[in-house]
Structure formats: structure tokens, C-alpha cells
Amino acid sequence: MKATQAKFLCLYFLLAFSCCKPEKFSVKKHQINLGHFLFFEKKLSVNRSKSCASCHSPQFAFTDGYRRSVSALGENLLHTAPSLINLTGSSYFDWDNPGVQSLETQIKRPLYNKHPLEMGCNFSDAGLQKLFQGDSLYYALFRLAYPDSDTTFTAGHIEDCIIAYLKTLNFSNSRYDQYLAGEQSALTEDELNGLQLFSSDRLKCSRCHRPPAFTLSHFTNNPDSVYVNIGLYNLAALNTYPPADPGIRKKTLRSADDGKFKIPSLRNVMLTAPYMHDGSVETIEEVINIYARGGRKLDYGEYQGDGFTHKNKHPFVQGFTLSSKEKNELICFLASLTDTSYLANPQFTEPFSK
Ligand code: HEC
Ligand code: HEC
């Protein structure tokens, strides 16, 4: 079906819905629905090349598969795109800037930032009117989302609707969740062994990736707990990460903050490779080898050095030995955190191509 036909079909359903069941399809739901379209809307970027979903694709659990994301102008950003699943309740929304404590603050960065540019949306409110002028789909969506507004589309509306949409990306239908809900058979024996290892004093994974969110960002707003150094770099044994990307040190300028990055969630971790803030770890096996060693040693390239010896490394990352059977069990457990059931719901996939 052509995009225009699809749009009209959508419009038809929307109008039919809103006429018959106004009480069921509340204004808030219409704002979420508009946010869904805007999340996938490339027109919002400076050259119409990137939407939020370009870097946060549902297929990759709302990441993009790149080591470092690629901007609307084709340039590499500093970091890899994190998953956007289950952000509700999180205290921090940035790899290395603990100042970003709400989605309201966060969203301005991809939309408007110039250095580095991500989408480079530089439209005034008047520019936005023009962008959507004559678009019957958006016109209808907007009227439903803002029945009392006599102005059309402002930047504030766009931000609010996308944020409302982000807040619906809460999924807890992995086999691990089913197990938590009491379904004993949801996890295999290997996965259960892996869960035990994950939570053990020997490995200490769950001390930082605390279930059910698998990060501390949902449990505390103390930045010292959420932003930690796990020993990925130690350039020339000078206790430094690569100078262009030194973690929260970039903001605080304190050497005690070198290499500290946010603890990411591990939900859907099998779909979010490559790993770490800079996408420098390709596979989950490699991640586990790094923890088992107590830090990463790089013997070649411009970032040579042994992360094991970085003075800021968190005391929980000391290394451990793991048999190949145990390693396999740990990976099986991480894979049980995969939940792609949301892909069956059109509300969470590309709205324009159907
Ligand atoms: C060019 C790729 C790109 C685009 C486009 C993009 N993002 Fe991101 N997003 C990223 C990267 C990279 C990060 C990590 C930023 C950092 O912390 O350095 C990120 C981080 C985030 C986070 C923080 C998640 C967390 O757990 O810390 C949210 C929320 C987010 N983006 C939402 C959006 C929304 C909404 C849009 C559209 C308005 C969008 N992004 C567009 C690449 C992108
Ligand atoms: C001291 C806290 C801490 C402990 C303990 C810890 N992690 Fe992490 N983990 C982090 C931080 C912080 C990052 C991100 C580091 C970065 O990008 O510089 C991370 C990243 C990861 C990633 C990459 C996720 C992604 O999306 O990029 C995986 C996978 C992971 N950890 C698994 C584990 C496992 C398995 C264990 C136990 C063996 C473990 N972690 C123990 C703090 C911790």
C-alpha cells in the first residue's frame, strides 16, 4: 500500500474512533499517538534524513547497531545509542552527563544540538507550521491531541508528545519476567544457573545491574553510584580514558571522575551490540572476558594500556574465574532478558510504511 493511502486509512480510523468513543480514547492517548508518528518523522531533522527511530530502532530494542551513532549530516557522534526501553523511573539519561535528569532535558539534545549535531531541528514555531502545512494526517492528529489549542504545532507540543510516547516504552514480558511472575518453567536450568552466577558474590553483576531494571539508575539518584569506571582503558598507565571521551570528568574536570560512565540497563542486551559507551566491545563473550579479567588490556592502537590498573576502577570489578560451562550459563541468562513481543504491536513499529 502506498504511503498516502496508508495515511488516509489511518486518518479514517482515527476519526471513526474519536467520533464514536471519545471517552475511551482520551486526549493523552492522542498525544501519545501523535508522539508515535513524530518519533518516526524524518522531517524533523535539518535535511529530512533522520528521525529518532533512525538511531533508536524498534528492531534493535531502540538502538541502532552502530558503534557510535551517525548524525543527520553523516558524522559519528561520540557515543553509542542506548536502548529506550523502560526509562520510566530512571534518574539519569546520559552516558556521561549526570546533569541530564529528565526526558524533558534530554530530548532537547537530539532535536536541537548543533555541536555535535544529531537531528539539527532548527525550526521556529512558524517554520514548524510550514513543515506540516497541508498535511491532513498531522492536522487531524494535532486536533485530536490538542482539542483546545487554537495555534498549531509548536516545538513544545512536539517535545511533549514524543516524551509521552517514550513513557509508553515499558516492556516486561521476557522469560525472566514470566519467571518472576511465578512461572517456574519459564527459565531453563542453564538460565537459572546463569541467574545465580549473575547475582553471586563472585561475579557481583547484580550489584550494579540491579534487577528488575538491571541498572542502579532506577534505584538511586546518587551519581556516585550510577556513574562508575569498570576499567576499559588506562592510557599509558596515566589513569586516563581517551581524552576526547573521559566520562563525567569531561564536566567536572576532576581526575577522580575519569572513566566514569552510566551503568546501562541489560534488558534486551542480546539485541543492543556493540557494547559500552563507545561501542568498543563487539560481543557479549568479550564483555564477560573483560569482567573476568577485572578490566580490559589493549596491546595495540592509540589507546594502549591496562584498564585493570586504572585508579578509579570500581572495587566490584576485580576479576574472577569462570568455567566455559558457567560462561555459557551466564550468557543464557542474559538472553532470557530478551523481550521483542512489543514488535507485534503496531504502536511500537514504523507507522508510515504499512
Ligand atoms: C543521530 C542518532 C540519534 C538520534 C537521531 C536520536 N538519538 Fe537519542 N541518543 C543517541 C545517542 C548516541 C545517545 C547517547 C547520548 C549520550 O549519552 O552521549 C542517545 C540517548 C538518548 C536517550 C537517553 C537514554 C538513556 O538511557 O540514557 C534518550 C531518552 C533518547 N536518546 C531519545 C531520543 C529521542 C526522543 C530522539 C528524537 C527526538 C532521539 N533520541 C534521536 C542517538 C540519537
Ligand atoms: C561496578 C559496577 C558494575 C559491575 C559490578 C558490573 N557492571 Fe556491567 N556495566 C557497568 C557500567 C558502568 C557499564 C558501562 C561502562 C562504559 O560504557 O564505560 C557496564 C556495561 C555492561 C554491559 C554493556 C551493556 C551495553 O548496553 O553496552 C554488559 C553486557 C554488562 N555490563 C554486563 C555485566 C555483567 C555480566 C557483569 C557481571 C560479570 C557486570 N556487568 C558487572 C557497571 C557494572
Image (cartoon, helix red, strand yellow):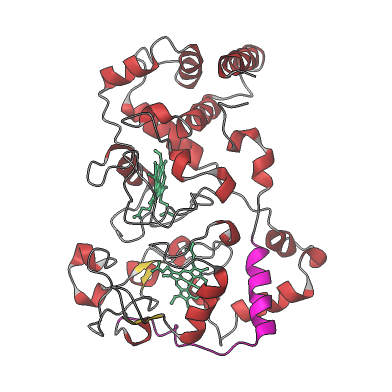
**Compared with residue 230, is residue 8 higher up or lower down, i.e. above or below?**
above
Q: How many tags in the picture?
A: 0
Q: Residue at x 41, y 80 (%)?
A: 296
The image quadrant where one finds the N terminus is top right
- Inspect this view and state whether residue 267 appears: no
**Which residue is most to the right?**
185
Left/right placement of residue 166 relative to residue 237 reads right
Q: Quadrant of residue 197?
A: bottom right
**Which residue is most to the front?**
300
**Compared with residue 312, is residue 44 higher up or lower down, i.e. above or below?**
above
As for residue 37 lying within the magenta part, the answer is: no
In-front residue for pair 41/236: 236
In-front residue for pair 120/214: 120
Q: Position of residue 216 (x, y in %)?
A: 46, 67
Q: Position of residue 70 (x, y in %)?
A: 37, 47
Q: Which residues are magenta?
A: 312-337
**Compared with residue 114, is residue 129 higher up or lower down, i.e. above or below?**
above
Q: Position of residue 222 (x, y in %)?
A: 35, 67
As for residue 322 lying within the magenta part, the answer is: yes
Left/right placement of residue 18 relative to residue 127 reads right
The image quadrant where one finds the C terminus is top right
In-front residue for pair 253/213: 253
**Which residue is most to the bottom?**
321
Q: Position of residue 300 (x, y in %)?
A: 34, 78
Left/right placement of residue 225 relative to residue 57 reads left
Q: Quadrant of residue 345?
A: top right
Left/right placement of residue 55 relative to residue 228 reads right
Q: Residue at x 73, y 59 (%)?
A: 178
- Inspect this view and state whether residue 353 appears: yes
